[in-house]
Image (cartoon, coloured by chain):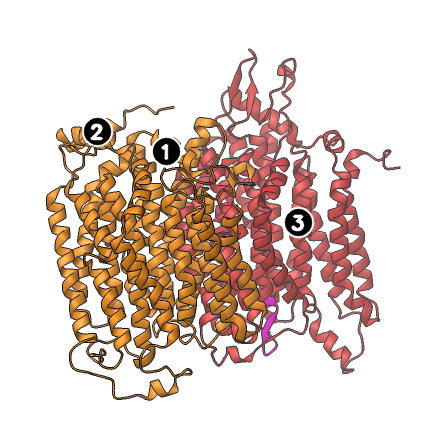
Chain colours: A orange, B red
Amino acid sequence: MLLIWTSILFPIVAAFAVAIGPTKFAKWTAFAGTLVSLGALTLFAWNFPAWHNAEHFPNTTGPSWIPHAGITFSVGFDTVSLLLALLSAFLMPLCIVGSFSAITERTKEYYGWFLVLGSSIILAFAARDAILFYIGYEFTLVPMTLIIAIYGGTERRVAAIKMFLYTFLGSMFMLATLLYIGWEHRLAVGAWDFDIDTLTKTATRLPSSTQYWVFAAFMVGFAVKVPLFPLHTWLPLAHDQAPTAGSVILASAMLKLGTYGNYRFALPMAPAGGADLMSFVAVLAIIAIIYASLICWVQTDAKKLIAYSSVAHLGLCMLGLFALNPVGAEGAVFYMVNHGLSTGALFLCIGMFYERYHTKDTDVVGGLAKRMPVWASFMVLFTLASIGLPGLNGFVGEFLCLGGTFISEHDGQTGYPGVLGPWYAVVAGLGLIFAAMYLLILLGKLVWGPLREPHDDAAHATSAIRLPQDLCFREIAILTPLAVACIWLGFQPKPMLDAIAPCAERMLANYPKEVERYMSQSAGTPLASINGKTNESRGE
Amino acid sequence: MIEAMSPRLILLAPEMILFVAAVTVAILGLSKNHGIRASLPFITCAALIASIAAVPLTWTNENAQAANLLLPTLGRFVKPLLAGVGVLLVLLSVGSVDRKMEESVARGRMAFDPQRVVRGEFYAFFLLSIMGAMLLCNAQDLIWLFLAIELVSLPTYIMVAIGGSGNRNQEAAVKYFFLGAMSTAVFLYGFALLYGSTGSLQFLEIRSALATQSAGSGIDTLATIGIVLILLGLCFKITAVPMQFYAPDVYEGAPTHVTAFLAFVPKTAGFTAMVLILTCVGWSGHTLIDTDGIRIPYNGLPTPIAAILWMIAILTMTLGNIGALLQSSVKRMLAYSSVAHSGYLILGLIAGATAGIEALFFYLLAYGVMTTASFAVLASIERRGEEINSFSDLAGLRLRHPVMAWMLAISAASLVGMPPFIGFFGKIYLFIAAFEADQFGLVLAAVLNSAISGLYYLKLAIVPLVAPPSARSEEVTSVPSRWPFIAAVVCGVGTIFLSAIAGTLVGAAKSSAQASPIVLTASQAALPTASTH
């Protein structure tokens, strides 16, 4: 417990130190703050007793905050949330170091907000109280909006405001739903309680018509964050305008809050709704995959391309989750972590060449392997990881997500029936082929081919910190840990998959029954199934 | 000595302190000594702090019981709330009242003229207005309620006129006065009808009479119309639809520190009065016992009253938020935001005893702190000696006054309901109360409205922090007095600190919402009294 709170609160302490201390120490203070946070979390993970079961640890309720409303300071991890928190904590120091040369103005505020951002992301993953989760989830918006609005590109204010409003609107629905489930708990038990496990137990007992709406409202909130088609329109702009480190955290940690929300709240709390809406969400996810891939194909802005590829990849992740069987869910969780690593690394790579050339347009710059061989080899590695080349980390997650979709069929040989099946998998698989195409085209333009550099080098000359032609030691030091992680997870996915499996099964515990019910109902007329549900009595 | 005094009088100790202080500052304001005149705001603060201290000393359970009040513990939370936010509001006004005259005197351009100073009067009226709001907590009958609420309003009309130094102040004051007088007429008419229907001015007797009526054939039409008129009249004080029209003009025209006062004190008074009146009617959760000794649950507020409050709540929050979206003046925007927050607060009224009342007062505390924070920032900067008004004046505020820009951003975040600021917990608590009253529709409306409000509060945070400075904002300087700035910092830090101790504050608000048990009328007096919960 102490270690968790250290990893959450130490960045905030460091943020105060940054705010008070002199400007020239700001970046090192921030780096130290994130390192301590990562260290505390690693130490916690090292001694984590629940790697191979689905339990939360520590399994106790924290001190009370607002007793009348049942809000507590409860934090704890299961395997999935611990992995995602570790991912965020791991990326924070890399992002801080990655910003050393990019951020030259208002540095104190930048590092201060970055620390607060990291802290609230870890809080959201660690929270075992729904309101505490909401605080972390929602507060990430404040620093991210400011980081984009202050340090972003030319359209930064529009991008920041759009991001804030989309996500804020979505999360209001989520908050209302959480309060509603809290109220149902209050009705059943007589006291307010926002412990996530307790709420899950209460919510699963609600009649299926209610669960349908609970699920729909959760989906509105989390789909904005994931982002799922058609609510994704804020993301490419935000990524395009955000500073490099902001993009990394946005893609790798903040978007994961959306998928994590589905994993932790929407799916387990409203299994009946999840079963009813399974194919609907899956169709949206597939549209996201195909649509975003096609956009990537014609995209000449390298950063926007990676942003849209994020939409496609997270669509695949959602598809895996909504296959509603352990294979898909394991794959989705594994993919969350690996998408964080490879896409985060890609954004860092793009940022590094942007700092040198001040353009992201692949029509203007190209053939950089001749100029920056070290950078080019990292770029190729991470792009291949993102495509899902076997032997690298992306492959395992993608394969499992598609495999889960494929076996999500009526016959239920796996014990987990579903309504998706091979056709969904085939169409989504097209997205993977598209991904290989657009990412290889990107590589072809940017890394290989004839050398093209912008002639006007004025912006380069005025840059405050002169960078060497190829990557400097600092930049190599940032990318190396990510590269090691990508390769290691590609060859050794099993320990992590084994750790995820019990959690995935626990999350899906109610689904076989609910999907059976859904399928038997939809065998009759569709309208009858909706009317029939309203007559079910409310369970105790 | 104190034992000999009647309990009702002892409960008035905070008001007495404020009254003595009001007289003192009015006289000291005429002093030729500059130091004494300068100390007036601090004497006012001291009096407010003393009155906070007096509340726990005097408001004991025995005294409250003996005083025969409708809500015997109400004052224990509301009085310190008023005085506490009052202290911050005083800090906002330091250096503003009589500023031009004091500067001329200091430079020797004119001699001190006791006929021209208004600082003493200003602080005296300030204290009297807060005193009026405090007196509401002790109201036992309609006459007291009327006098107290007029004591809140009358000084504010003058404060609007004399608090600053512009012509717009007078215009705003006249507008405020005439509309205020009209609203007074409306609720006085409601009092008359209520008296006509129940035959009593005493709250406890009115409540018994209404309980008897509703146990029989339902509450009288006359009484219903009376209560509706009272509520509509009070809507003026809380800037709710249909009486909100004055708010943007008056808030914009009044000097900023008085605007902050208007946004909090009359609103708190109006809601306290509404709570008292609606407690007479009774919410669901109250029970009474009929002649056969069978417990009959109240079915909540009578349908017409509940329906009207429902409409007021939805219209107030929606019109407030949409109005705020369209503004380019910061003060007008904050005026509409104040209207919208009244809409949220009415959720608490509809939810009723006791969760709703708790949530209402807790939210008033949160609202008081966060809205004062934003007005305090506005009060601590000026442009060419004039108050700043438009958003373009705020652009680039961060460069010259970073802390102020941050405080404005924090108050905006808190007003929109962003965790972990106090506004978030206020909203959560209101929603929880509305859920307990089965008002899902209202929660949904409030949620959608919060989402709309994100649009304009984001502007309030982004413009000072991010926008590049304009030609106008280059001329923005801080006011000579440091105190408004200090108030802004205290409020800004308060929005975070108060959420850390939210549990304690909610507990305090909870203990203020208990109603005294219903005493039945003569025909039913033999039966045991029903308890409220």
**Viewer can see residue A322:** no
Disc 2 marks a residue whose amino acid type is Arg
Pointer 1 and pointer 2 on the same chain: yes
Residue B353 lies in quadrant: top right
- At which x and y percent is residue A58? 47, 40
Query: Which residue corresponds to the image point at 51% horizontal and 55% vertical from the top-left?
Result: B414
Disc 1 marks a residue whose amino acid type is Ala
Label 1 and label 2: CA atoms lie apart by 18 Å
Judge left or right: residue A100 versus residue B521.
left
Q: Chain of mark 3?
A: B
Tag count in the figure? Answer: 3
Quadrant showing the C terminus of chain B: top right
Up the image or down, A18 lies above or below B417; here it is below
Up the image or down, A415 lies above or below B22; here it is above
Q: Secondary structure at mark 2?
A: helix
Report which residue position mark 2 lands on.
A517
Q: Secondary structure at mark 3?
A: helix
In-front residue for pair A395/A180: A395
Report which residue position mark 1 lands on.
A203
Q: Which residues are magenta?
A: B379-387
Q: Chain of mark 1?
A: A
Disc 3 marks a residue whose amino acid type is Leu
Q: Secondary structure at mark 1?
A: helix
Earlier residue among tags 1 and 2: 1
Pointer 2 and pointer 3 on the same chain: no
Query: Which residue corresponds to the image point at 61% horizontal and 43% vertical from the top-left?
Result: B505
**Viewer can see residue B153:** yes
Judge left or right: residue A478 versus residue B53.
left
Q: Which mark is residue B82?
A: 3
Circles 2 and 3, Cβ within 8 Å, touching? The answer is: no
Up the image or down, B90 lies above or below B166; here it is above
Judge left or right: residue B453 versus residue B521.
left
